Image: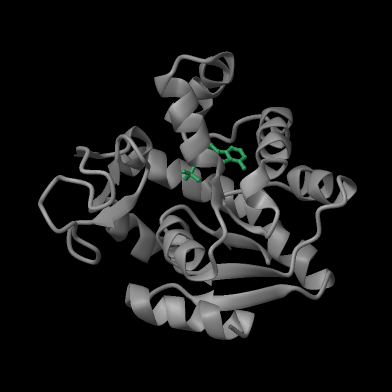
Amino acid sequence: MKLILLGAPGAGKGTQAEIISKKLGIPTISTGNILREAIKNGTPTGLKAKSFMDNGKLVPDDVIIGIVSERVACEDCVNGYILDGVPRTIPQAEALEAAGIHFDAVISIEIEDSVIEARMTGRRVCGKCGASFHITANPPKAEGICDLCGSELVIRKDDAPETVKNRLKVFHAETEALKDFYNKLGILKLVEGNQPIDAATKDILAALGV
Ligand code: AMP
């Protein structure tokens, strides 16, 4: 099963990807997490990506395409994977198609900007493994600590209100067109994002027919 989770920043892609990944036994590939790790490790990719990410801009397509091509070739991807936060532009989607990578389904998590802006202030992420929490909608078992790896939870720098506004603008300008792209391929499915996490998961699994 090869899946794409599409949606605005804060729509719940990371949270749903984590749940579905466990259910289906396939890995999640989050370019955001890979880039944050690269920045932490001071790699050349991280150095290239940092200023774009800090400002809520998109990292150039060639960097993203390189990261994804390398990751999907890994052994744990043989039975499929979930793409979270990629593709984000038409050229990225075209590059995947050109590489012969075809998807079973593209789930678009639908949610209004105003709901997202309110949501983002409560988001906390694990500084180590990238797992995503929310102080009210999805709190960790122990405050400030990741349920999965026990590391400290942090506020993402790009979750600052002004940066969120910018990221939403970028989403509407660059990423939303992907819905049309995948609709034409007949694999787009829409799921309501403004509902409790388990209800959205149920809708996603129903849309996938699993
Ligand atoms: P995310 O964790 O998916 O919200 O991504 C955080 C940031 O990483 C984005 O705001 C972009 O700056 C960058 N990024 C992640 N994935 C992509 C992508 N597919 N294309 C371009 N930039 C990306």
Query: Please, is residue 132 above or below residue 137 in the view?
Result: above
- The colour style of the image is one colour
- Quadrant location, the N terminus: bottom right
- Position of 190 with respect to 118 (left or right) is right
Q: In terms of depth relative to the viewer, which is nearer, 183 or 105?
A: 105
The residue drawn where x is 30% and y is 35% is: 127
Q: In terms of depth relative to the viewer, which is nearer, 75 or 102?
A: 75
Q: Residue furthest front?
A: 75
- Position of 18 with respect to 120 (left or right) is right
Query: Please, is residue 196 above or below residue 97 in the view?
Result: below
Q: Position of residue 19 (x, y in %)?
A: 42, 65
The residue drawn where x is 55% and y is 54% is: 27
Q: Residue furthest left?
A: 143
For ligand 1, the image quadrant comes to top right
Q: Position of residue 182 (x, y in %)?
A: 76, 66
Q: Position of residue 101 (x, y in %)?
A: 81, 53
Q: Position of residue 53 (x, y in %)?
A: 48, 30
The residue drawn where x is 10% and y is 53% is: 142
- Quadrant location, the C terminus: bottom right
The residue drawn where x is 49% and y is 67% is: 20
Query: Please, is residue 138 above or below residue 125 in the view?
Result: below
- Position of 58 with respect to 94 (left or right) is left
Instruction: Name the image quarter holding residue 159.
Output: top left
- Position of 51 with respect to 155 (left or right) is right
Q: What is the number of callouts on the image?
A: 0
Instruction: Name the image quarter holding residue 187.
Output: bottom right
